[in-house]
Image: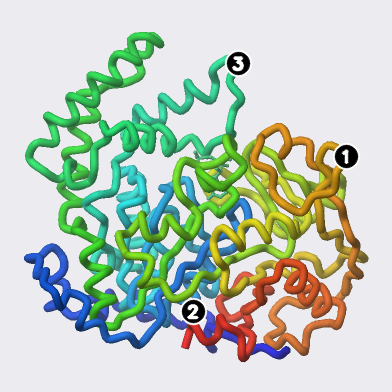
Amino acid sequence: MEGRSLGGGSKAASLPRMAALRTGTGISRRHLSTFCPGPLRYNREFWAGTAKSMSNLIVLGAQWGDEGKGKIVDLFSEKFHAVARYQGGHNAGHTVYIGERKFVLKLIPSGVLRAGVQAVIGNGVVIDPKALLEEIHGLEAMGVDVKPQLKISNRAHVIFPFHRTLEKISEGREGRIAIGTTSRGIGPCYEDKIARRGIRVADLVDSDFEQLYRALAEDKQLIADAFKLTDRVDFKEILEQYKQYAEEIRPLVCDTQHLLNGLIREGKSVLFEGAQGTMLDIDFGTYPFVTSSSAAAGGACTGTGVPPNRIDGIVGVSKAYITRVGAGPFPSEDLTELGEEIRRRGNEFGSVTGRPRRCGWFDVPLLRYTAEVNGFDSLIITKLDVLDELKEIPVCVAYEVDGKVVYEMPASTRRMEVIKPVFERLPGWRTKTQGIAQMDKLPKAAQSYLKFLEERTGVEIGSVSNGPERNETMIIPGSKLEKLLE
Ligand code: IMP
């Protein structure tokens, strides 16, 4: 196998373009006015005009998040017309290095760093307007003119400060097993969504916001009274703040399902960006130690309104080892000095909370499980270079549960917690791999390691990333991934 490098020459290639303060998104004004939020022109030929030329791709985490999706999405986004986030909120943290500059994106899709790419926050996302505006202003201060490129779904739900307060009570309550959440109010906001009392962006920017807010606040007031929190939640002040946020957000709001489907009908391509990772998915993750949204590939459709038959490929991103933030089962966790070393070398500290990430070894049963749930066409292995110094590398190839060797991910919390990992040890390469741009130039032991992962997981490795920079990523020629990116 050999590889070629993506991302091109100059490290800071797109920054001058950013600084030039973009005026548009590469998408015609006619298009935007037609689909966002213009009149619905539904008829029998609705899809007839679909000019299929490029792939619509989902890129998502194959482990517990923090796999390096931000860099991959940023890299791939140059080949797409739009990049859409489909779940989660500002609990996510996607780090992108462009030359000397570090961008940490929480709510806004990484695609916004590319001139002309339409960035979309889909209906499956929960939005804290304060966090969103801070992120927009922060990016603007770094020369990224976000607003002309960003659209926000009118169906996304809104996070309020009392969601964070409720989360703190819930996490801190005696007798409750703490999930170790990011404390951003994500779970309580999704609770309101599912309980059908949430407030959506469309309501926030509408004239009856105050009325809806009062109904929700009344509900929360009861809880605040019960927990004697009345002094900590100022409902009136929140209302006034949110009215101000609404003014600034309003021009960015539209029916993003209509926008995205319209783009696809025109033959334009969409990259769907997952946050968090499959093992934090509300249904398929290590429940209850999960986030409250559908992080798996299926969430890309429900979280944007783009139908499943418009998706052409699904790509999983996995570290060459594995990490997890927060509490919950972690079969291949390494609690020895070696785990510490991986944390140091991989700089494994949460980009949102700064918490040290728990570190462990590549877990084959877990990856096979997430590959099945998501239908991965291809895998991208990141941070290979972090393993450069190791003499040997353990890989978890099976689980021992209640004395039996199993290859599947158990569903019950108890069984997940008692898993004993079965390891095979592969020789390390003890050579610097950072920045090597071709698979056949990697040390033989590194090539064997990757081959081993490919064979055991049953999913092709279509790309390997071995450094934080955009151009420190190789795409394997002839891979499915290469075809999907054509
Ligand atoms: P929540 O999403 O804040 O409710 O947190 C639920 C769990 O998901 C906790 O274990 C968090 O540490 C984890 N989590 C949430 N977002 C991320 C992320 O972007 N990367 C890694 N873990 C995350």
Question: Which corner quadrant of the image does residue 46 belong to?
Answer: bottom left
Left or right of residue 317: residue 89: left
**Which residue in the structure is indicated by mark 1?**
403
Q: Residues within 10 Å of mark 2 (few under 14, many from 20)?
A: some
Name above or below for residue 186 compared with residue 225.
below
Q: Earlier in the sequence, mark 3 or mark 1?
A: 3
- Residue 305 occupies which quadrant of the picture? bottom left
Residue underneath mark 2? 12
State the SS at label 3.
loop
Q: x and y percent of residue 206 in the render? A: 11, 43
Q: Secondary structure at mark 2?
A: loop
Q: Secondary structure at mark 1?
A: loop
Q: Is residue 340 visible?
A: no
Is 195 placed left or right of 469 in the picture? left
The residues tagged by marks 2 and 3 sit, at their Cα atoms, a distance apart of 51 Å
Q: Are marks 2 and 3 in contact (CB under 8 Å)?
A: no
Q: Where 27 sits versus 284, above or below?
A: below
Q: Amino acid type of disc 2?
A: Ala
Q: Residue at x 81, y 76 (%)?
A: 446
Q: Nearer the viewer, residue 435 or 37?
A: 37
Is 377 left or right of 441, judged from the image as shown?
Answer: left
Name the residue carrying label 3. 175
